[in-house]
Image (cartoon, coloured by chain):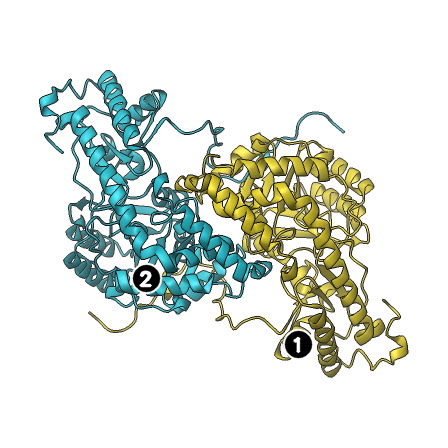
Chain colours: A yellow, B cyan
Amino acid sequence: MASAPFDFAPLLAPGLPPPAAKWTGRAKYNFIGGNNDADEVPVDGLIAAATAVLKREGATLATYGLESGPLGYRPLREFLADKLKRTAGIACTADEILITSGSLQGLDLVNGLLLAPGDTVLIEQESYQGSLTRLTRKGINAVGIPLDRDGMRIDAVAAALEDLERRGMRAKYIYTIPTVQNPTGTILSEARRRELLKLAQAHQVPIFEDDCYADLIWDGRRPPALYAMRDGDGVIHIGSFSKSIAPALRVGYIVARWDILSRILPLKTDAGSGALEQMVLAEYCLRHFTEHVPELTRALRAKLDTLMEALAEHFGTAAEFDEPKGGIFLWVKLPDAVDTVKLGQAALAAGVAINPGPDWSTNKAYGKNRLRLCFASPSVQAIQEGVGVLAEVCRREFGVPERIANVERRARA
Amino acid sequence: MASAPFDFAPLLAPGLPPPAAKWTGRAKYNFIGGNNDADEVPVDGLIAAATAVLKREGATLATYGLESGPLGYRPLREFLADKLKRTAGIACTADEILITSGSLQGLDLVNGLLLAPGDTVLIEQESYQGSLTRLTRKGINAVGIPLDRDGMRIDAVAAALEDLERRGMRAKYIYTIPTVQNPTGTILSEARRRELLKLAQAHQVPIFEDDCYADLIWDGRRPPALYAMRDGDGVIHIGSFSKSIAPALRVGYIVARWDILSRILPLKTDAGSGALEQMVLAEYCLRHFTEHVPELTRALRAKLDTLMEALAEHFGTAAEFDEPKGGIFLWVKLPDAVDTVKLGQAALAAGVAINPGPDWSTNKAYGKNRLRLCFASPSVQAIQEGVGVLAEVCRREFGVPERIANVERRARA
């Protein structure tokens, strides 16, 4: 045989993303991604759940879909139907819930249901990077809707829908993370929810509601889901256990009326999501979810306080932010001179990983001097030290923040 | 708000598959799918593994990718590198293995890497339905290569490659399940493997090797993988734990050189495959895989004998088959008069689920009177009874098999 290595280059599909770099481990001060607090993973509870459920039903792993069929492990869907009723006001049956491999698969499936290249969708101007990149890769025109402290601005939604209508177009959906928005941490007010639903109905545009952070609200006051307020009519809802239990468990779900879910299900060609994770989660959550979440939320809130204090100490008034109403992220504005993409590169070299704003916005100029910090994953000490290093790098690269006297350090805390 | 229900119909993406029907449970005699023997799920071992690994590393579930990065849980990749070396002759490092959500995600990722609508691939004429439907949905021209008792016919591969070359075309890959082929249960001989690799090299067409049944060989004599015989040059290899441990655990893997794996990895946008399943599998397999597989294989072999006896008893010479060399499936030929799609519908009404041949072949006419039976999942009693019912239905619908005297019953066993 010839010894020249095989050349795959002429065979590759068009439009592939660039190659991955080899993984070299995590940064010492890791403020990126949707990682969570290692101390709050309920390890003992998961062990007990795994033992109990495997002892009782382990043999069912021999069958795709266990004894539950293609929608996913029935006890988990029944837990969710009950939980969504209690916490989000959603009245649905277990047969209106499809378990997915994380809410990311939910995104893919809903996009597969509705989107074709050239389509238009509305999306919060600042939004989850994974949602934005999916739209870009599918060739979708994503119209960004600005946010304020109460979430998506409804006047901007109305204007965008009217503008599209004038041009003879119709958005395929309005994507929103209404409850603990990523990255801004806002909660869409109930009044705005009503207005949004009215607009969506008037323009016959469905709402795609991503509620994957909605369990983590400081004061526990979760507003009714958009899905609940319309009894599921014209709304598709997705959620996840990544934020409430553990991100490395890849278990999410889609809630939709059966006429829609029956169109989504054939797109899920993976022979089911991982059954062991579904079984263990169901067994754990049925007993402990209600007590676990407030404990997790208290720990996250304490870390947010640490982060806000550290920013005040090291950045002073140079770092502006609104306090998020829950979740694991703080969205921070730095002075106009700062370019957070460049800051991110320089910070990484110093051991600090951050998410630059432009990756989390449809408006790259608006995102330029903004960044997202995850406070859930780093330890209290790492938050304090990491913000100090970040401030040093920022000062060196952009001249801000100026040195701050100790007397000012609590000005913004 | 208006009360007419929201109409999604005008918004659906083009080319969606038909809606799913509601799941109504499994057939009483269930010979479909790649389900396995419930008695052989190593429940106690999995409980011990879950307990040990969660106690030791449970807190790492707080981070996407655990401490292992995006290729998957490192101890599982290290187990695989060692196992593939021992059993398939593959020399690869843990960094040339990507853990996937079942081998189905492996199919999707490799297809995403290489295929665009209108492309051509070569595939065994009888092949896994999930592979065939993926090609159809992507608009791929799948050229079927006939099989005989030694697997894919190499003369037919050569002819197909030459025919394409004459037409100025080049196949994107040759997809093969060389070791315990699905559905035929054949093993591609080592001589044919050499010829196939030579042809692929000469025509500069990569080989896509799906080895997901390769652990389950009656005599344990697994030939070297195609990947091994070329040291990975021009070959992409996928595998799974679905058949060797349990199908509802969705854990598979891709083996490829880094220059290829680095192009596949960015297509895997799911934030990692389920970590608990990876952790439990690694913990279990490191200790028990080597002893578990022969035990499972013995149980499967006994069920195959039961099935072959039952077919001989109830169908006599009307059911023809070659004994598979391993695995969980028997590929059966019935008399020409039988249409297995119609037989399948009538049998289902009588409580027997079978996979009709046309779903498993690029040649629908060839598949018309053939069917695939999974013998791993039904109990010995269900196999015996189910084949009896199937024969009754077949006789009623197609006049075959004729009634068989008891003296003939072991004629084919």
Query: Disc 1 marks which residue?
Result: A347
User: Which of the two residues, A14 or B251, is positioned nearer the viewer here?
Assistant: B251
What is the quadrant of residue A227 in the picture?
A: top right
> Is residue A260 rendered to the left or right of residue A407?
left
Q: Amino acid at mark 2?
A: Lys
Relative height, residue A198 to residue A215 (above, below): above
Measure the C-alpha gap from mark 2 to mark 1: 41 Å
Q: Count the labels in the image.
A: 2
The percent coordinates of residue A125 (x first, y second) are 71, 55
Label 2 crowd bin: few (<14), some (14–19), many (20+), radius 10 Å: some
Relative height, residue B97 to residue B143 (above, below): below
The percent coordinates of residue A303 (x first, y second) are 74, 63
Relative height, residue B25 to residue B212 (above, below): above
Q: At 26% from the left edge and 47% from the top edge, which residue is drawn?
A: B297
> Is residue B78 rendered to the left or right of residue B50?
left
Q: At 56% from the left edge and 56% from the top edge, which residue is drawn?
A: A248
**Which residue extends farthest right?**
A407
